[in-house]
Image: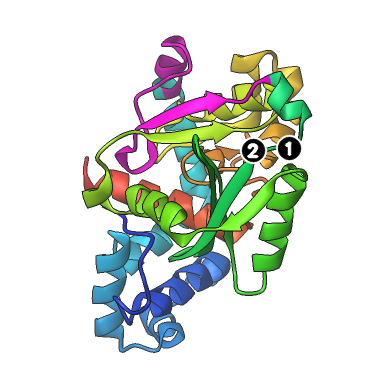
Amino acid sequence: MLNLAHTATADPNYARISRALLYLAENYRRQPSLEEAAGVAGLSPWHFQREFTRLTGISPKSFIGHLTLEHAKRSLIDGRSVQDASWSAGLSGPSRLYDLALKVEAMTPGEYARRGAGLTIFYGWRSTLLGRALLAATERGLCALSFAGDEEGPSQYSDMVKRWPEARFVTDEKITGAYADQIFFQAKRNHAIPVRLFGTPWQINVWKALLSIPAGTAVAYSALADKLCSSRAARATASAIGRNPVALLIPCHRVIAASGALGGYRWGEPRKRALLALEAGRRESIT
């Protein structure tokens, strides 16, 4: 089981592995050696190998091996039959990232028009292997999950505020921490996670469709658009995907270009590539 979130005080090597993971995702084309990655983490090669495997669930060699566009292309091809089966069941396939169960609820048109007026949004930060995570929630469910490096935190917060400019924002590590524990730690998964989606009807339709893409596979923007409406709507679909407010849980990282190119990702291409590689490696380890 992938363990993407942790606290620095609980695990002194957590930040080291996080730094090395994103470094590999950015520099995979050079095929960095184990020694180079270990140097980035500030650990011996043997220690790095052990800690990376423990925290991510796959070995450094497997991770680097999956950090290729060729793998993404194979996933796109291999995933089509599985994907079609999920879509034929009504865009509600059983696969969830890390076996999570979600209870997704969309806001009403009136709530969307009010732009968050009268709404209190609680937010907080949590360290993860993919960078700091910003979580936000209303009384009715999680409404945002995004990633940021140390220098990206202010922009992530600003984006959240722009989505709901009339809302009241309150820091609450207890509320958001409870969501983080349930998302990232197996022992905390005792009930479905409520997700509150704020967007246009088209955006919400696209975001819900993303839930049917199985972990460890990828689909093309055009294929997703074709299932929703028409392949001619690929640009509108890509735009809606780019506005996905809930990373990981709504897996927009699993949509790539038909050519196998990764395409865009709100939280940076290295994070998208790392997520796909981690999921693919984990999928292979359990099949």
User: Residue 101: which quarter of the image?
Assistant: top left
Q: Residue at x 28, y 59 (%)?
A: 57
Q: Which mark is residue 257?
A: 2
> Residue sitting at 24 percent across and 83 percent down?
46
**SS category of the residue bearing label 1:** loop
Q: Percent position (x, y) of residue 219?
A: 53, 32
What residue is shown with label 1? Answer: 117
What is the CA distance from the residue labelled 1 to the residue labelled 2? 37 Å
Q: Is residue 151 above or below residue 280?
A: below
10 Å crowding of disc 2: few (<14), some (14-19), many (20+): some
Give the residue type that dot 2 points to. Answer: Ala
Crowding around mark 1 (Cα neighbors within 10 Å: few <14, some 14 to 19, many 20+) is: some
Among numbered discs 1 and 2, the one appearing first in the sequence: 1
Which quarter shows the C terminus? top left
Q: Nearer the viewer, residue 42 or 35?
A: 42
The magenta stretch is 83-108
The amino acid type found where label 1 is placed reads: Ala
Q: Is residue 203 left or right of residue 137?
A: right
Q: Position of residue 136 (x, y in %)?
A: 55, 49
**46 above or below 93?**
below
Q: Quadrant of residue 96?
A: top left
Front position in the image: 213 or 98: 98
- Reply yes or no: does residue 229 show up in magenta: no
Label 2, secondary structure: give it: loop
Front tag of 1 and 2: 1
